[in-house]
Image (spheres, helix red, strand yellow):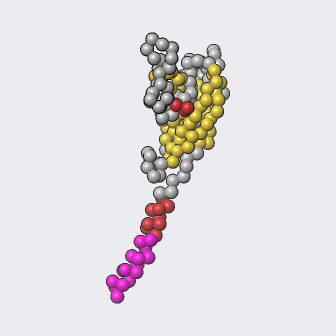
C-alpha cells in the first residue's frame, strides 16, 4: 500500500516540476526603452545632449533589460583600396573589404564592429568620439539569453539620425 501511495505522489508531483522548468525557458525578446547621449561638462558631471560635437568624447546610454547591448554609431567606415588605385577592394561575394566600420549596414562583414557596452547605473553605456561632422545613423543591437542557440533572441533598434556639429 505504501508503494502505491508513493508512486501516486511522485506521479502527481513530477509534471509540476517539469512545468515550472518549461516556464523558465520562455525568453522574451529584448526591448530598448531609450537611448540617450551624454557629454562630460566642466564640473565633470554627465550632461544630456542632443547633438554631439566633433572630436569631443561622448557617451551613449541604452536603457534596456537585455543581457547584452551593442551600439553601432555609424561614424566611421573605411574601405580598403586596391593597390596603386582609387578603386575599392571587394571580396569574392561582392562585399567591400573594410579597414574598419561601425555602421550597422556592414553587420557581418570582416572588420565591421559595434561598440561593446558596459553596465552602469542608468543602463548599458559606451564611450565614443565622432571624428567628422554630419548626420549618422545610430543602431542598437540588444540580445537576451544565449548565443546562437534555440533560445537566442536579438532585436535591431534603429535609434535614428544623429547630427554631429563642428565646435
Q: Say if the magenta span includes residue 102.
A: no
Residue at image coords 47%, 17%: 81
For residue 22, above or below residue 10: above
Q: Is residue 127 above or below residue 28?
A: above
Q: Position of residue 55 (x, y in %)?
A: 56, 17
**Which residue corresponds to the image point at 34% horizontal and 88% vertical from the top-left?**
1
> What percent of the width, then of the height, locates residue 67?
49, 44
Q: Position of residue 94 (x, y in %)?
A: 49, 29
Whether residue 103 is visible:
yes
Residue 140 at what x, y percent from top left? 56, 36
Among the 4 quarters of the image, the one containing residue 43: top right
For this orientation, the residue located farthest to the bottom is: 1
The residue under the point 61% across, 29% down is 137
Which of these two is toward me, 92 or 148?
Answer: 92
Quarter of the image with the C terminus in it? top right
Q: Is residue 11 magenta?
A: yes
Q: Is residue 86 above or below residue 118?
A: above
Q: Is residue 121 visible?
A: no
Residue in the image at 59% along x and 39% along y: 157
- The span picked out in magenta is 1-15
Which residue is at the front of the view, 66 or 155? 155
Amino acid at each position: 500500500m505504501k508503494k502505491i501511495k508513493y508512486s501516486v505522489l511522485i506521479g502527481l508531483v513530477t509534471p509540476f516540476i517539469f512545468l515550472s522548468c518549461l516556464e523558465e525557458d520562455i525568453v522574451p525578446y529584448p526591448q530598448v526603452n531609450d537611448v540617450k547621449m551624454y557629454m562630460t561638462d566642466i564640473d565633470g558631471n554627465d550632461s544630456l545632449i542632443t547633438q554631439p560635437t566633433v572630436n569631443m568624447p561622448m557617451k551613449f546610454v541604452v536603457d534596456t533589460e537585455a543581457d547584452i547591448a551593442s551600439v553601432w554609431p555609424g561614424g566611421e567606415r573605411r574601405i580598403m583600396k586596391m593597390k596603386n588605385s582609387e578603386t575599392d577592394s571587394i571580396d569574392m561575394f561582392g562585399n567591400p573589404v573594410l579597414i574598419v566600420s561601425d555602421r550597422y549596414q556592414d553587420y557581418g562583414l570582416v572588420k565591421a564592429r559595434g561598440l561593446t557596452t558596459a553596465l552602469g547605473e542608468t543602463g548599458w553605456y559606451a564611450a565614443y568620439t565622432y571624428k567628422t561632422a554630419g548626420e549618422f545613423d545610430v543602431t542598437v543591437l540588444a540580445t537576451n539569453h544565449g548565443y546562437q542557440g534555440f533560445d537566442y533572441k536579438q532585436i535591431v533598434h534603429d535609434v535614428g539620425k544623429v547630427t554631429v556639429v563642428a565646435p
